[in-house]
Image (cartoon, rainbow, N blue to C red):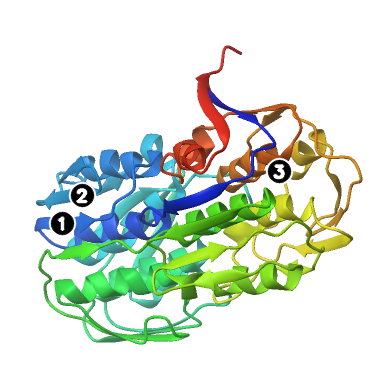
Amino acid sequence: MDKIVIKGGAKLSGSVSASGAKNSVLPLMFSTLLCDGEHEFSNVPKLADVHSACKLLSELGAECKHDGTNMSISVSKAPSIEARYDLVRKMRASVLSLGPLLARYGEAVVSLPGGCAIGTRPIDLHIDGMKALGAEIEIKNGYVIAKGKLKGGNILFDTTTVGGTENVLMAAVLAEGVTYIENAAKEPEVVDLAEYLMKMGARIEGAGTSIIRVEGVKDLKAAKHKVIPDRIEAGTLLIAGAITGGKVRVNDCVPEHLDALMAKMREAGFKFEVGDNFIEVQECQAWKGIDLTTTPHPGFPTDLQAQFMALMTQAAGSSVITESIFENRFMHVPELKRLGANIQPKTRVAIVKNIEAPLKGAPVMATDLRASASLVLAGLVAEGQTEVKRVYHLDRGYDDLEGKLRSLGAQVERRADDQ
């Protein structure tokens, strides 16, 4: 098992590029199950979750080849329509195999998912969506067992769900008739999935809005697609520059995907230069605490809440951070406090207060993907040495984060953890 060791105090500067989006590439990979042929993707990040998705796809009749940032997925008839627990437990996105398998084969057996322990995140909305398309669903022995010939229907999600929107969208493209998905997620990753499905021959309108219309087709064809940049990684790198008082440019990103982050950072006192495909955070020696609440896109993303909290530990005054998406997403707070941060957590609200003394390096434990990133960011400004353990969480969603930080001047390295 590895750990990341950081010697704090270096001001970051320079340019770095964002990799392809984790939250986009995974649904794209599972969408390939909708038809035979060779699907080709570019800008694919090297992540543990991508590797896990390849292992699951191989059991479902697909062969993945990942060379650099290019990936080809050759799909043939699935020898099995079961997504086993041993694979699904490692990655929540595996539940996205449900919609494609059910749409194409009329049946699917998918284990209840795993992933980061940041909340219950039930898949009730996924199941309700499949039922609205005519599927019969049974939960048995920890598996979702789905059967039925799908027909278009009207789905109204009680709450916005990215995974639920993606799963139903993939099921609906081969369903007979027209499907309307209301209160659909508007995230860029949903739009990216819809664009690839349309390249395959799907008929979709409204992706990126609250109502998506899908007209089912009889079959699809494999296509080529470039994965969108990872807005969460880009945001993490911008915060890395900001928290050290540095000037960092993140290239190969989509600036409008980060409007909510930049708005809050501007409120705190930061300034940016923004181009067509880059964002550069300017040097800032002092910033103030602000309040924020995580909300679905286009609001402030929950996946940047932990990183922003690390930034607020260095702000003047107090900040109130409210987590409205997941009920257990403050697990990084005790670890930040080990470094000396003054944070008072409640169930869904954390009050972050300014500390007169700097953070002090210490061993800390990563509890989930984004918590890992927040601890690395805090380590960049902590006096002395910070060791972030259990960084396999980080590897699920960041492509060589420590290498990118080193390229900006950070003193950070990966080592084997003897304990």
Residue 70 is tagged as 2
Q: Mark 2 and mark 1 in contact (Cβ < 8 Å)? A: yes
Local SS, label 2:
strand
Task: Give the amino acid at mark 1.
Answer: Glu
* Residue at numbered disc 1: 40
Of residues 16 and 87, the one drawn nearer to the viewer in this rendering: 16
**Percent position of residue 221, x then y:** 10, 68
Among the two numbered marks 2 and 3 on one chain, the one whose residue lies closer to the N terminus: 2
Image position of 356 with respect to 187: above or below: above
* Residue at numbered disc 3: 332
Of residues 44 and 219, the one drawn nearer to the viewer in this rendering: 44
**Percent position of residue 217, x then y:** 16, 80
233 relative position to 268: left or right:
left
**Percent position of residue 96, x then y:** 36, 57
- Residue reaching furthest to the top: 418
Mark 3 packing: few (<14 Cα in 10 Å), some, or many (20+)? many
> Residue 329: in sight, yes or no?
no
Image position of 21 with respect to 64: above or below: below
Residue placed at 11% from the left, 72% from the top? 219
128 relative position to 194: left or right:
right
Q: Tell us which disc is closer to us: 2 or 3.
A: 2
Q: CA distance from mark 2 to mark 3?
A: 34 Å
Residue placed at 61% from the left, 13% from the top? 419
Task: Give the amino acid at mark 3.
Answer: His
Among the two numbered marks 3 and 1 on one chain, the one whose residue lies closer to the N terminus: 1
Local SS, label 1:
strand
- Residue reaching furthest to the right: 356
318 relative position to 91: left or right:
right
Local SS, label 3:
loop
Residue 174 is tagged as none
Task: Give the amino acid at mark 2.
Answer: Asn
